[in-house]
Amino acid sequence: MKFTRIALPVLAAALMSPTASAAEETWKSIGTGTFRENFLHNWYIYSDFPEVEVEVMESEQTPGRYRIMNPYSNYPDFIGSPGCLEGEWYITVDASDPVHCYIETSKTGYIAGDGQMLIVGSVADDYYNNRYGDWVLADEENVCGKLVDGAITFPPMALLASLWEYDQAWTDDIQYARCDQKGMFRLKLPGAPDLDITGNLLGINDEQTHLNFEIALGKSVEKARVAIVERDKAESAVEGIVNGTILSEEISESGNVAVPYTGDGFYTLFVVPYYEGTPRTAYRRDMEISFDTSVWRKAGTATYKERLISDCGELIPVGFIFKKYDYEVEVEESVERPGYIRLVDPYGPAWPLTGGYKYDDSRRWYIYIDATNPDEVVLEHAAGLGVDITYGRMEVWSKADRCFNDPNYFFHGREDAISQGFFGSFVNDEITFPKNSLCFKVAEINPNTWYETNSRGEFSVKFAPGQIYGKQSGIESVTVDSNDAPVEYFRIDGTQVSADRLVPGVYIVRQGKNVSKTIIR
């Protein structure tokens, strides 16, 4: 688990009065539950979300009101002890109305540093108990938690967190930041059934007829139905899966499941669990299926030196500081335009920092780089990277491409791009850009301003020799008649295979400038 402290400002604020416990309210222990927190992500980055055992108490006056006792005492040492004060600390969760759950202002006992204690709460509590006295706005904004099958969860960005100088007097004007960007908070009450499900796409079979998914079922799941549905039909899909009008695969244990592949597009994976003989809340995961290699060739992976977010020099003075990482990313190359490439999900799971932020994995996110002219490489406008580091949507663009496609830019055309030294280059199997020739924008910092990035000129995408078919700067091209050129075979993932070692499956065939797909049976 990675644990890194970062400097982030409070991005949203709410004024809340602390909710005082009624003197007559008493509590009883109901056993051990499990607690998964997502408050500290406003200040720290984890690569996962640990779930720990906690004692749970229930109000003797109001059934459904719970306390998570000493919530951080069982967390790993670098999160909990010695960061937790001794004594009795708790988070109060009111689930007396199962569809309007909220977290009251709670002192957690966790010391985040500099004598500051983590204070938590929820938007629903603020709306209902402090502001309006009803659930109208809370329902409209979808900020209430739900109690389903013994587990209390909240929608993304419905919780609040703050740091309070605990040795100072409590005040009513503490500022809170919205948190739980991924909606990962969960309290499982003692005795709750284990209905957890995960589903991951493993890939496609060699014949490209079925998609393979790895499905893990919780121990309380009696059986499950697995289906993949076009996303525009997903809203009514569960009913169809249950009544059989939508084709599904029934499983009774964890394992791999094959579902028919009908083509690329946007789909939703559904796994409907059954417990005590009835279907329960379905697991769903939106995704973009992309296996057709007739347009984009799978070119394997390349080493990506991330310097778009981490090297934005103009924003460093205001605290926009992120560690630099070099890591492997998937790469695809245009079949019709060799040298025109795209980085696949460069800020998805491959990026070491993604685990701490909200990432939209319902589709693939790309950065397109046109290196068809190796001396005039451009990084095209990417209107989103998929990741929200609490600053809102991020965009990137190269100054060279802005010269051609940004009417508001003060440089225009190829001559300006050359004279200003904006173009990148493709040399020695590596794409690089000059210092400050790339641009970065974030919605909540300044939606109308592009900031210079790659301030040290370290951004690069490094390939293996011959991995990209496009020509490179300084390498003379040799014209070869396609009919006389040797025939080369590549797997779908871009790795080359000797012609005498082919096994049944789908291959990309290259002969000279001609590229095609074939099936070996």
Image (cartoon, helix red, strand yellow):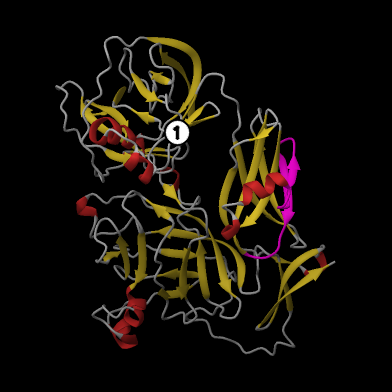
The percent position of residue 473, horizontal first and vertical second, equals 47, 80
The residue pinned by badge 1 equals: 99
Would residue 89 be found to the left or right of residue 330 on screen?
left
Residue 350, compared with residue 382, is above or below; it is: above
What percent of the width, then of the height, locates residue 201?
64, 51
* Front-lying residue, 450 or 492: 450
Q: Is residue 193 above or below residue 22?
A: below
Q: Nearer the viewer, residue 155 or 508?
A: 155
- As for residue 251 lying within the magenta part, the answer is yes
Q: Residue at x 40, y 33 (%)?
A: 100
**What residue is at 44 percent from the left and 21 percent from the top?**
64
5 part of magenta stretch: no
User: What residue type is disc 1 on?
Assistant: Val
Q: Residue at x 29, y 28 (%)?
A: 118
Image quadrant for the C terminus? bottom right
Image height check: is 228 above or below 489? above
Displayed quadrant of residue 326: bottom left
Left or right placement of residue 333 versus residue 448 in this view: right
| Structural crowding at the residue carrying mark 1, measured as other residues with C-alpha within 10 Å and reported as few (<14), some (14–19) or many (≥20) | some
Which portion, as a residue range, is magenta?
244-264
How many marks the image carries: the answer is 1
